[in-house]
């Protein structure tokens, strides 16, 4: 399956603990969408969140985020892991 990196921008900043809770919601919801959220990164001050997901499509990843917690990414970019 392809890998995607999604990018969220939260205008007033974001707390790491809130992102952790959203990621946990993804893990609980991802099965029916055939996606696997692998990792996430957070820049609290700039309100940036990056999620790495193994998914059949960008649309599947976005749909799962919407269902799990409502935080749909601003961008979903297909990526290839480097060595």
Image: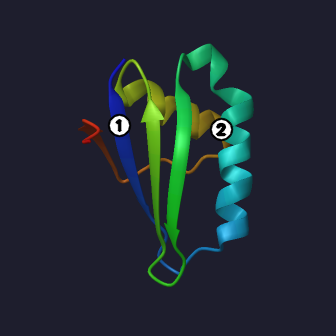
Which residue in the structure is indicated by mark 1?
4
Which circle marks residue 70 in the picture?
Answer: none
Up-down relation of residue 51 to residue 12 (above or below): above
The answer to which quarter of the image holds residue 48 is bottom left
Q: Residue at x 65, y 69 (%)?
A: 16
Q: Quadrant of the C terminus?
A: top left
Which residue in the structure is indicated by mark 2?
26
Give the mark count.
2
Q: Residue furthest bottom?
A: 45
The answer to the question of whether label 2 and label 1 lie on touching residues, with beta carbons closer than 8 A, is no
Residue 76: image x %, image y %? Answer: 33, 43
Residue 3: image x %, image y %? Answer: 35, 31
Up-down relation of residue 2 to residue 16 (above or below): above
| 81 to the left or right of 52 | left
Residue 7: image x %, image y %? Answer: 38, 55
The answer to which quarter of the image holds residue 30 is top right
């Amino acid at each position: 399956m392809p890998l995607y990196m999604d990018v969220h921008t939260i205008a007033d900043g974001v707390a790491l603990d809130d992102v952790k809770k959203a990621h946990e919601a993804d893990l609980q919801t991802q099965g029916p969408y055939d996606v696997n959220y692998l990792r996430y990164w957070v820049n609290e001050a700039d309100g940036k969140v990056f999620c790495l997901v193994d998914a059949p499509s960008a649309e599947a990843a976005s749909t799962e985020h919407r269902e799990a917690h409502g935080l749909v990414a601003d961008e979903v970019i297909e990526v290839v892991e480097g060595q």
